[in-house]
Image (cartoon, grey):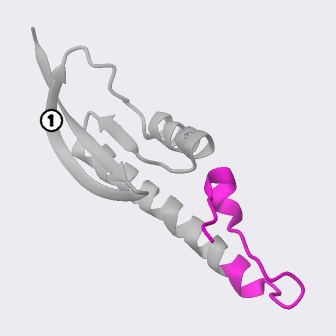
């Protein structure tokens, strides 16, 4: 069986943890466009509340560009959360929940 060399961006716990060169069976159905993978990233976030996953690309440049997009996505979520927390009025509402976390939060008492 023929194999194809691709670049895998690994995202774990919403952080880009690796960009690796791997071989997969050809034809692999690897994303040829960053737009496809960016849409997959957004879909993962909507469905799971995180962007964790393995994203495959045909070039190291696409993989690096996507990794930067993923990091920027998390940065924007963090900035939005920080702004919401800073603006929250704890006198009128003592509890704060991060809206970016959706229903993923479990409160332990």
Residue 80: x, y in percent? Answer: 65, 71
Residue 39: x, y in percent? Answer: 54, 38
| Closer to the camera in the image, 60 or 47 | 47
Q: Is residue 86 magenta?
A: yes
Q: Which residues are magenta?
A: 83-109
The secondary element bearing badge 1 is classed as strand
In the figure, 28 relative to 104: above or below? above
At 61% from the left edge and 53% from the top edge, which residue is drawn? 104
Residue at the far bottom in the pictured view: 91
At 22% from the left edge and 39% from the top edge, which residue is drawn? 7
Q: Is residue 72 left or right of residue 53?
A: right
Q: Is residue 30 magenta?
A: no
At 39% from the left edge and 49% from the top edge, which residue is drawn? 66
Q: Which residue is mark 1?
A: 22
Q: Is residue 17 left or right of residue 89?
A: left
Q: Picture quarter containing residue 23?
A: top left
| Closer to the camera in the image, 4 or 18 | 18
Residue 56: x, y in percent? Answer: 31, 35
Q: Is residue 96 left or right of residue 56?
A: right
Residue at the far right in the pictured view: 92
Residue 52: x, y in percent? Answer: 42, 47
Q: From the image, which quarter does the C terminus lie in?
A: bottom right
Q: Picture quarter containing residue 105?
A: bottom right
At 45% from the left edge and 38% from the top edge, which residue is drawn? 37
The number of numbered badges drawn on the structure is: 1
Residue at the far front in the pictured view: 109
Q: From the image, which quarter does the N terminus lie in?
A: top left
In the figure, 106 relative to 10: above or below? below
Q: Residues within 10 Å of mark 1 (few under 14, many from 20)?
A: few
| Closer to the camera in the image, 72 or 89 | 89
């Amino acid at each position: 069986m023929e194999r194809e060399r691709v670049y895998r961006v690994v995202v774990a716990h919403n952080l880009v943890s690796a960009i690796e060169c791997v071989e997969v069976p050809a034809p692999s159905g690897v994303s040829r466009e960053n737009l496809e993978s960016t849409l997959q990233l957004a879909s993962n976030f909507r469905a799971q509340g995180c962007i964790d996953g393995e994203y495959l690309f045909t070039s190291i440049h696409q993989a690096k560009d996507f990794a930067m997009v993923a990091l920027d996505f998390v940065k924007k979520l963090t900035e939005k959360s920080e702004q919401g927390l800073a603006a929250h009025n704890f006198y009128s509402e003592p509890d704060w929940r991060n809206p970016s976390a959706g229903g993923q939060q479990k409160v332990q008492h």
